[in-house]
Each structure stands twice: as C-alpha cells, then as structure tokens.
Image (tube, helix red, strand yellow):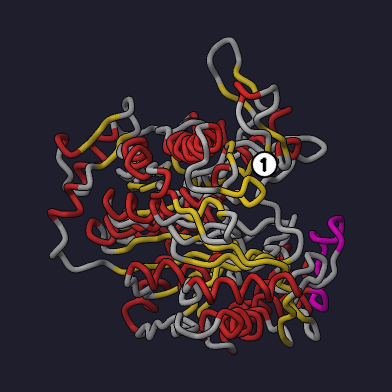
C-alpha cells in the first residue's frame, strides 16, 4: 500500500495559475510562491463584494480517538466529489502546525487519495504565514522586555506579564523559563514561558480579522500585562501594533493550492481549537464563498469544541450562515467510544457500536441546536461489516440526520460522489435556521454554563475561587460581553479525557479565564489543556527524512 507522501508525489499538479484561472482569477491578482503555490490578493475579495455568497458547509467530527475519524480527508474528498457532479467547490481549511507534524500527527493535509498538494510544502514552511505570526508575537515580547529595561515608564508589574513567547514546535522544556539573566546589560530578570505559535492570540486575530486595518486595531487591543495598580497594559501602550501589521501584511493574503484532482484549495489560518478558534481564516472563507458554489470548511477537534467555536465565535463575528454541517465518524472510532480495545476494533460488535454511537448521537443533537441541518459521513474501513454500517445508517436516519458512506480515502473524488449528492440534496432542500447558542450580553458564568449543559451534557459548572475573582475583575474592566472560547480536552464531552461515549452525571471545572481582548473572546480553561504540547515517546520526526534524490519520506 502506498504511503500518503508517495501518493502525493505521484500527483499530476496543474500550475497554480491554471487553478486560479478556473476560479476567474487573473495572473495579476496572484503572488506566486513557486509553480504550485500562490497567494491571492485581497483585491479580489473587494472586487467580488457584491456577488452573492455560495453555500457554506462545515465539516466537523465526533470526539477524536486513536482509531481515527478523517475530518480533513472527508473535507477534501467532499470538495472533489462535488466537482465530479458538476458543482464548483473549494476546500477551505487550516494550515498544519509544525509542532504536531513533527510530533504526533506527522502532517495534516488529508490522506490517501483525498489530499491537498504540494503536500510536503503545506506540512512544512508553506508560504511562511506561521513564521510571520511567530515573529510578530515575539516582537511584542521583545518590546515588553525592552520597556522594562528602559525605565518601565508604564509601571508594568514584571510578575504580571501575561504575554508569552511562542515557537511553532512542541517543546515542553520551554513551558516555563526565566529571561533577562546575566546582569543589567541583559535585561530585567523575570519568569516567562513559551506557547506553541498556533495558540498565540496573534493566530486568533489573524484568523478573525477582516482586513489589515482590522488586524492592526485588534493587535493594539491585546492585553499583555498589568501595572502595579492592577490596570491592564495593551499592545498599543507599547506602540507595537503598526510593526506587527507590517510583519503580517503578506500573511493576510489567502494561500491557494489544489487537491490531488486539481480542485482549488484555500489553506489559510491555524489549528488549535482549544485556545484560538481552530479553523480557516475569515478572509479565506469569505473569499471562497464568492468564488465557488460550495465552500467546504472545517473546525478543529470534535464538534463540541471546533463546531461550537465555529458557530459561536467565527460565524457570529463574520455574519456567516452555515447551510449544513457534515459530522465525520468511523465504525472503528464509535466502537472505541463504546469500550472496545485497539485489538478489537476490526471485529464486529454491535453492542460496543451501540454504546459508542451515543457520542455521535449527541453531536447530531448539538448541530441541530444551532439550527443547522446535519449530515453524517461514515468513513468506510475494510473491516466494517454490513451489519455495523447498516446500524449506523439507520440510527442516524431515526435522529433526523442524513447519513452516507464515504470512500474518499481509497477512491478520491469518485468515493465522495454519493456524499456530494446527499449534501447538495440537503443544502438545497432543507433550510438552515442558524443561530448562535447564547447572547454575548449574558454573564460570563451564564455563557459557560449554557455551553457546558447544552453542548457537553454536564450537570453544571464549578468555578474555582481564584477564577471567580478573575471573573469579577473582568466584569469590572468591561470585558465580559464577549464570546467564550472553551479550552477543554478534545477526547471527551467532559473535562476528563477518559470519559468516552456520552458521559452523564459530571460537572465541568473552570480554573481560570484569560482575556483575549484583541481576538474578541474570553478563554475558559478547564482540565490540563496545554498551550505548549510536548513530544510523544516516539515523535513523528524520527521517521521523517529527505533522501539524496530529494525525495521526502515519513510525512503523512
């Protein structure tokens, strides 16, 4: 069996200018990065502003498992399937992060015969957007430390600097560091730490900004520290927003690549749905809606995190109205949620499947709570039995969700035709009555409790004493009327990753709330969510290599 990278390397790619031409984009609106990658000038979006939007489809998934679900693969395969049946479609997805690519995941550009290419470039430095974010973030850090060194006119309390440095690599040793050692010439000693780049507030701002001026304003509103009197210090106080905007100017243009079947793909913005909003940029999504009949986008992790944030944060800020949501599941993953061990996943077991199906059932219910029609895409595996597949299809039908088998991993667009036809039927027949789950003007606690009870199925929420003090302070500063970005494990509806399926009788504990004033939301921290992940025992990096011929191996 060929590896993902081998399949990608054998692909017949079109010059990116030809892919752009299919969308009506002229060469003078492209900024080429070699033969197969380009950025699209935002002039195109401005020129098309009065054109009606196409249909917006969100691809999400059940809570992820070691058995795998295939959300990105489904997204890409669906866009190719739509083109096969005569619809113009664009896949609009997030860019992979180098941390997971060299850590756990080994890449994130789809899989099998449903990939975006050039896969190696996309999984590596691509067009440098994340490096621009890293540099912008660390420029702010440098200016904060320089301000301390130059007399600290703002009276910043070094113990209350909340802005961290970032690096686009999993590196647990950098979570907590001390900077400024070595005497007066080397700065003011203080505790600091690193987050992974994709968890930076700059990433969230990059994904949510509508233009460069909006980005500049949002960056200026970032809270980086607190003064000795407890009042906040903003980026605009250290006058960094202009320089950051300059560093980000090229990154703001969406990236155009293609699928294995030459379907256009806009890859722009970052993952990390726990801290940022975890999906494709607002600019790329809006551009795609103008260029194609169908925009197939996705949101990170399970639907309880990614889809909820897409609906409550991104769609709210961008005035987006999703027409349908595709929930990706596999029989194997559902059996895992039902208690099956890894070695049992290939054996038929309808009892385990029935127990695990409850996870999917809850996600279907949740999507319906937002007023959006749901379609279930079952990624078919060779070990799936007819009885297992029929069980899932029938149960979905009973819940008011259309279900369809997907074979895009092995067959590409051809394996997505049935899914594409079902999507068109639903998107054109059913009306989306999309609305966010809560009103932003509700109290912080009320918003969090609504998410926890309605989306997770929790009995309620417990706020630690320190968190309650933080909430009171946020209210005092007037930052309480913002959406909530829940930072929670992706593996469970609860804040305990071991509670699989559809747990009940649990409560969510919120230990802290962080203000992302630039991005425009509050981050509620639960459990042990890491903003700087570590590497596993055997990192994917150990199997990644480049041969003397220039051939890349190990990415997947």
Q: Position of residue 195 (x, y in %)?
A: 62, 44
From where the camera sits, is residue 80 visible?
A: no
The answer to whether 448 is drawn above or below residue 497 in the figure is below
Disc 1 designates what residue?
A: 193
Which residue occupies 12% across, 54% down? 47
**Which quadrant would residue 359 be assigned to in this image?**
bottom right
From where the camera sits, is residue 95 visible?
A: yes
Which residue occupies 86% across, 55% down? 343
User: SS class of the residue under badge 1?
Assistant: loop
* Left or right: 104 in relation to 32: right
**Which quadrant would residue 282 be assigned to in this image?**
bottom left
Camera-nearest residue between 475 and 517: 475
Read off the magenta span.
Answer: 341-352
Number of dots carrying numbers: 1
* Left or right: 419 in relation to 409: left
Q: Position of residue 536 (x, y in %)?
A: 78, 40
The answer to whether 163 is drawn above or below residue 122 in the figure is below
Is 350 magenta? The answer is: yes
Q: Residues within 10 Å of mark 1 (few under 14, many from 20)?
A: some
Where does the N terminus fall, quadrant-wise?
top right
Is 470 magenta? The answer is: no
Camera-nearest residue between 537 and 440: 440
Q: Position of residue 188 (x, y in %)?
A: 63, 33
The answer to whether 326 is drawn above or below residue 149 in the figure is below
* Left or right: 329 in relation to 287: right
Q: Position of residue 458 (x, y in %)?
A: 72, 83
């Amino acid at each position: 069996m060929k590896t993902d990278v081998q399949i990608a390397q054998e692909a017949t790619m079109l010059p990116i200018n030809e892919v752009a031409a299919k969308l009506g984009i002229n060469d003078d609106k492209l900024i080429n990065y070699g033969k197969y990658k380009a950025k699209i000038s935002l002039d195109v979006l401005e020129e098309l502003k009065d054109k009606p939007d196409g249909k917006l489809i969100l691809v999400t998934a059940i809570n992820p498992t070691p058995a795998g679900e295939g959300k990105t693969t489904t997204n890409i395969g669906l866009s190719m399937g739509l083109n096969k049946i005569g619809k113009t479609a664009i896949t609009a997805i997030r860019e992979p992060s180098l941390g997971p690519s060299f850590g756990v995941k080994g890449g994130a550009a789809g899989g099998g015969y449903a990939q975006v290419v050039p896969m190696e470039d996309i999984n590596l430095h691509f067009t440098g957007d994340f490096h621009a974010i890293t540099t912008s973030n660390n420029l702010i850090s440098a200016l904060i430390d320089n301000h301390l060194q130059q007399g600290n006119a703002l009276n910043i309390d070094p113990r209350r600097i909340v802005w961290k440095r970032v690096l686009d690599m999993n590196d647990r040793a950098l979570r907590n560091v001390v900077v400024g050692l070595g005497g007066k010439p080397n700065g003011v000693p203080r505790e600091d730490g690193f987050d992974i780049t994709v968890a930076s507030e700059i990433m969230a701002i990059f994904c949510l900004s509508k233009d460069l001026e909006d980005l500049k304003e949002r960056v200026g509103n970032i809270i980086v520290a607190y003064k000795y009197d407890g009042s906040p210090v903003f980026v605009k106080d250290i006058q960094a927003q202009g320089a950051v905007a300059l560093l980000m100017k090229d990154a703001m243009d969406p990236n155009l690549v293609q699928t294995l079947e030459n379907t256009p793909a806009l890859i722009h913005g970052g993952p990390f749905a726990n801290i940022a909003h975890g999906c494709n940029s607002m600019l790329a999504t809006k551009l795609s809606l103008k260029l194609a009949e169908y925009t197939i986008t996705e949101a990170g992790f399970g639907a309880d995190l990614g889809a909820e944030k897409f609906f409550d944060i991104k769609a709210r800020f961008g005035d987006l109205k999703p027409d349908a949501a595709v929930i990706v599941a596999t029989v194997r993953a559902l059996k895992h949620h039902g208690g099956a061990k890894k070695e049992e996943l290939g054996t038929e077991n309808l009892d385990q499947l029935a127990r695990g199906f409850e996870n999917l059932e809850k996600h279907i219910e949740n999507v319906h709570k937002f007023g959006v029609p749901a379609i279930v895409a079952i990624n078919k595996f060779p070990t799936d039995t007819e009885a297992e597949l029929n069980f899932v299809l029938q149960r979905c039908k009973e819940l008011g969700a259309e279900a369809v088998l997907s074979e895009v991993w092995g067959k590409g667009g051809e394996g997505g035709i049935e899914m594409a036809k079902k999507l068109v039927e639903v998107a054109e027949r059913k009306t989306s009555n999309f609305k966010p789950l809560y009103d932003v003007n509700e109290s912080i606690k009320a918003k969090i409790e609504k998410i926890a009870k309605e989306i997770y199925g929790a009995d309620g929420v417990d706020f630690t004493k320190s968190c309650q003090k933080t909430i009171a302070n946020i209210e005092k500063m007037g930052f309480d009327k913002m959406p909530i970005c829940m930072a929670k494990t992706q593996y469970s509806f609860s804040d305990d990753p071991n509670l699989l399926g559809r747990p009940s009788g649990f409560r969510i504990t919120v230990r802290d709330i962080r203000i992302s004033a630039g991005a425009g939301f509050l981050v509620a921290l639960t459990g042990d969510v890491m903003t700087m992940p570590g590497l596993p025992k055997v990192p994917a990096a150990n199997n990644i290599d480049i041969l003397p011929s220039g051939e890349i191996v190990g990415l997947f």
